Image (tube, rainbow, N blue to C red):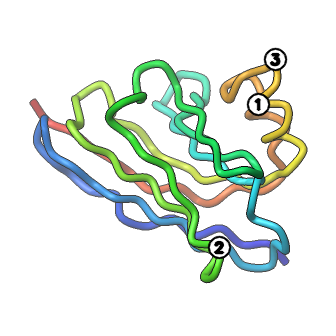
Amino acid sequence: QVQLVESGGGSVQAGGSLRLSCKVSGYTNTRGSMAWFRQVPGKAREGVAGLDSEGIAKYGPSMKGRFTISLDTANNILYLQMNDLQPEDTAMYYCAADQEAVVRAFGNSGLTTAAPLFGHWGQGTQVTVSS
């Protein structure tokens, strides 16, 4: 059984930092299969960052330069380092796993469009940024 468990969310002031973690179990090949998304109530899920099989990262437009995605394959933990957080980054953050979805996201579809293709999701961790 695949399980993705996020942690590390919290409340910070604008300009602050947080590091999210996603512990993956039951999924045999995390390399090239992982991504982060976020969602605000009433809005569609938005792609934040993904990693392809060669470790190349892809970021949403407003995250590039502030967020860094990384994967500890030895321990099956996906990370998202978020710096210079702004109030508009307030959302529930989810990690997701699906190798085919990552391939599509790095192709023509992009992360946000590929979101429905991901077969495995965590329960989410809330990030709240105050001004």
**Disc marking residue 73:** 2
Crowd tier of the residue under label 3, counting other residues whose Cα lies within 10 Å: few below 14, some 14–19, many 20 or above: few
**Disc marking residue 108:** 3
Crowd tier of the residue under label 1, counting other residues whose Cα lies within 10 Å: few below 14, some 14–19, many 20 or above: many
> Would residue 33 appear left or right of 77 to someone viewing this image?
right
Q: Which residue is mark 1?
A: 105
Q: Amino acid at mark 2?
A: Thr
Query: What residue is rendered at 41% in x and 59% in y?
Result: 20
Q: Amino acid at mark 3?
A: Asn
Q: CA distance from mark 2 to mark 1?
A: 21 Å
Q: Earlier in the sequence, mark 2 or mark 1?
A: 2
Which SS class for mark 3?
A: helix
Which SS class for mark 1?
A: helix
Q: CA distance from mark 1 to mark 3?
A: 7 Å
Residue 31 in the image: above or below residue 26 = above
Q: Earlier in the sequence, mark 2 or mark 3?
A: 2
Query: What residue is rendered at 68% in x and 29% in y?
Result: 111
Query: What residue is rendered at 80% in x and 72% in y?
Result: 2
Please identify the quadrant where the C terminus is shown.
Answer: top left
Residue at the outermost right position: 100
Q: Amino acid at mark 1?
A: Ala
Q: Residue 33 at what x, y percent from top left?
A: 77, 53
> Would residue 90 appear left or right of 104 to someone viewing this image?
left
Q: CA distance from mark 2 to mark 3?
A: 26 Å
Q: 13 and 82: which one is in front?
A: 82
Q: Residue 52 at what x, y percent from top left?
A: 72, 45
Query: What residue is rendered at 46% in x and 65% in y?
Result: 21
Crowd tier of the residue under label 2, counting other residues whose Cα lies within 10 Å: few below 14, some 14–19, many 20 or above: few
